[in-house]
Image: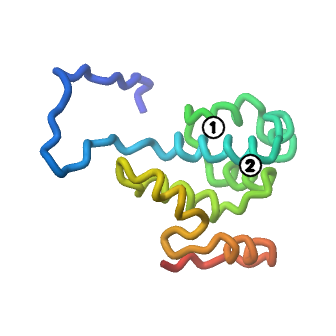
């Protein structure tokens, strides 16, 4: 990286979408999806940034940046945050994969699908996690 900030190029107007085709949605950044899912998990557990930071040995500032999708997170830090949240890393990654693969207009269908996505059952993932096994994610 050169330290230069990327800026959006203004469009020349609304793009027309041919009939029967889904509108183009830019692929979200992985760091943004991870951050959103981590923040949601922290909120469900009613934990503060301070709680998670202390339990994961990650600074509050860095954790905040991760949750807001402002910085890339290393695998070690991601694993530490997941441990602090009691969230299996495989579950977090599965949810992010779903976020990346749901077409425009089908978000409700994905929400109804619940824990069963891409052939992965979260109960099996969590059972493997709790038993100290690394679950195998097979489609």
Q: In the picture provided, is 55 more to the left or to the right than 70? A: right
Residue tagged by mark 2?
81
Q: In the picture provided, is 15 more to the left or to the right than 50? A: left
Q: What residue is rendered at 73% in x and 77% in y?
A: 128
- Pointer 1 local density, CA inside 10 Å: few below 14, some 14–19, many at least 20: many
**Where is residue 13 shown, x and y percent of the image?**
18, 22
Colour convention of the picture: rainbow
**Where is residue 57 shown, x and y percent of the image?**
82, 43
Quadrant (top left, top right, bottom left, bottom right) of the N terminus:
top left
Q: Secondary structure at mark 2?
A: helix
Residue tagged by mark 1?
66
Q: What residue is rendered at 56% in x and 75% in y?
A: 137
Q: What residue is rendered at 41% in x and 28% in y?
A: 2
Residue contact at pointers 2 and 1, CB within 8 angstroms: yes
Q: Secondary structure at mark 1?
A: helix
* Mark 2 or mark 1: whose residue is earlier in sequence: 1
Vertical arrangement, residue 36 with respect to residue 110, above or below? above
Q: What residue is rendered at 80% in x and 47% in y?
A: 45
- Pointer 2 local density, CA inside 10 Å: few below 14, some 14–19, many at least 20: many
Vertical arrangement, residue 42 with respect to residue 93, above or below? above
Relative depth, front residue between 23 and 85: 23
**Where is residue 125 shown, x and y percent of the image?**
67, 73
Residue 94 in which image quadrant: bottom right
Relative depth, front residue between 6 and 49: 49
- What's the distance in space between the residues labelled 2 and 1, CA to CA? 10 Å
Q: In the picture provided, is 55 more to the left or to the right than 90? A: right
């Amino acid at each position: 990286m050169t330290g230069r900030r990327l800026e959006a190029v203004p469009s020349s107007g609304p793009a027309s979408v041919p009939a029967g085709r889904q509108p183009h949605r830019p692929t979200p950044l992985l760091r943004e999806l991870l951050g959103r899912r981590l923040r949601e998990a922290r909120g469900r557990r009613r934990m503060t940034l301070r709680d998670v930071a202390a339990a994961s040995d990650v600074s509050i500032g860095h954790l905040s940046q991760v949750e807001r999708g402002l910085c890339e997170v290393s695998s070690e830090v991601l694993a530490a945050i997941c441990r602090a949240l009691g969230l299996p890393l495989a579950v977090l990654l599965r949810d992010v994969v779903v976020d990346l693969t749901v077409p425009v207009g089908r978000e409700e269908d994905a929400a109804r699908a619940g824990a069963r996505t891409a052939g992965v059952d979260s109960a099996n993932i969590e059972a493997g996690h709790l038993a100290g096994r690394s679950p195998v994610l097979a489609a």
